[in-house]
Amino acid sequence: MTSRFDVAETFAYVDNCLTSAQRSDFEARLREEAELRREVALWETQNAAIRAAFGAPVSARAAIDLGRNSNENQAVRLAVSEVDWRTATSLRTAEPKVWPAPPRAKTPTTAQKPPATVAKPAENPARQTRTERKSLRRVLVAVLAMAAALFFVATNNPSWPSDKLTAAGIAAYRAFAAPAAPTPLEFRTSNPAALTRWLAPQFARGVVAPELRSSALRLIGGRIAPGTAAGAAFLVYEDAHGNRLGLLIEPLDAPLPSRPEIRKREGLTVAAWTDAGHGFVAIGTDRDAVVELTGLVAAPGSTRP
Amino acid sequence: MPSSREWCDDAGAMRRFGRALVRDDRFVCDDASAIALVDKLFRQASLTLIDECPGDGSSARVRAFAQFIRLYRRHVRRLAAEEADAGWGEGPSVFARPSASVTSGMRALPLDLREALLLVVLVGFSHCEAAQALDIPLAAVVDRLCRARLRLAAHMGGPKRDALNDTLWPNAAHLRIVK
């Protein structure tokens, strides 16, 4: 049974107000009590939705990642800073300031001459050469490091928020598609075109509910869920055995296309990839169904807005 | 002295907080008006902060947000008084559209609940900092957070508020809300 004290503690955990020792104790309780886990997931999801709705930066408070072994919030807290009084003062003194006139010399002959420049003593040529060599070496190291980084980016998968996207997919699945999910779907339909029409006005760049050429997977509906940086579309499917699968689609800032990466996280099979300016996460308990969903959605032309 | 980047972060956070706070479908019904009002309040808060004596132990960031909130409350009181004088009454706004989105749910919250929830969730204040900024006890902040979250969850089609209330306070069925 949840007591009022527990509620305060739950909120303190969700809002990152516990000390590390208190957080460890609370996480130990979280591992034991499924009901408490469900509550925490609900409030974390709501927090993420509020931040996404009002454009708060994600780094201020990361979304809950139930896929991690330890459930600590790894987000960087905003530094408590002092007001820049110079800025505030400059705001206040908006009226033009009258500066005193510079003092004039009485006679041009007594005007002060500019001080003569003092010639620097010549440096030791050997030392100068060593310094030049050092700076040249630094420049070379920097150029090589940049070249290596460029080569890595060009030859490997481009850096896109794979982990964050996976975490967002897991959180959305647990909140909206799992059997004990606390929050229902916003729009129930089995028609992908109807879901696309419902999603269209909610995203600046269109999100298309894919038409699956499979009788094994049936669309149930969709809703808006927190993504990595903004809102994302979360579609829920059901397979022939009644298992639910989720598909998170989030418009991203022009990521390069990447192939699906299938992983196992906390008993869930997760496939994440990018294509056509969107990030995708297919997630479910049944690996075969997730692989099938991934294959159908990642097929060329199925999800291009 | 903080760097200008920190001040920019604070200013951005305050503007974001302000836009979420003042948009209420009652006095401020569009984004342009919200931005204008927030700019005005932000400037006033910056100016009045200079005269404040920082001897109460609170950080400048908390004082800045507290000042912003005080100014906004004064603004709302003045508008409410004008509305009452004009005899319009406080009815449902014609601009409020029924919707299950987070923003509409936030606008439907009373001001005191909205302030607490936005300070903690959007700005990232701890509960103690929010209590300082709102000038209320810590228990009141937790209580407001709880009521705000329940209302928002109910608005977004989540668990019903009564059911959650029964879960959270099983022995409080005999209590009633007195306004």
Image: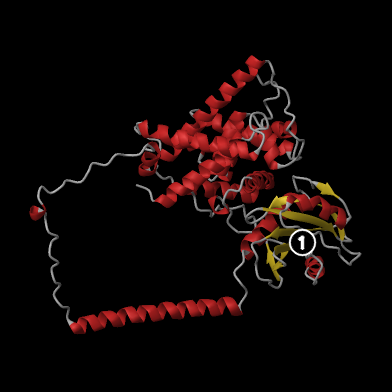
Residue A169 at x, y = what percent? 70, 58
Image position of A9 with respect to A151: above or below: above
Q: Nearer the viewer, residue A58 or A46?
A: A58
Mark 1 neighbour density, 10 Å: few (under 14) some (14–19) many (20 or more) = some
Q: Which residue is mark 1?
A: A285
Residue B109 at x, y = what percent? 66, 32
What colouring method underlies this structural image?
A: secondary structure
Quarter the C terminus of chain B occupies: top right
Picture residue at 23% right of the left edge, 80% below the top: A128
Q: Nearer the viewer, residue A7 or A201?
A: A201
Q: Is residue A250 left or right of residue A79?
A: right
Picture residue at 69% right of the left edge, 46% below the top: A38
Residue B13 at x, y = what percent? 52, 44
Q: How many marks?
A: 1
Image position of A214 with respect to B55: above or below: below
Q: Let me know if residue A284 appears in the view.
A: yes
The amino acid on which the numbered mark 1 sits, given as a three-letter code, is Thr
* Most distant residue in the right direction: A215
Question: Which image quadrant is residue A152 in?
Answer: bottom right
Q: Nearer the viewer, residue A23 or A240?
A: A240
Q: Nearer the viewer, residue A291 or A278?
A: A278
Residue B79 at x, y = what percent? 59, 23
Question: Which image quadrant is residue A47 in?
Answer: top right
* Most distant residue in the left direction: A110
Q: Considering the numbered disc 1 on the image, is that residue within a helix, a strand or a loop?
A: loop
Check the residue under mark 1 and report the chain it is in. A
Q: Let me know if residue A9 appears in the view.
A: no
Picture residue at 75% right of the left edge, 48% below the top: A181
Image position of A37 with respect to A284: above or below: above
Q: Is residue B29 left or right of residue B127?
A: right
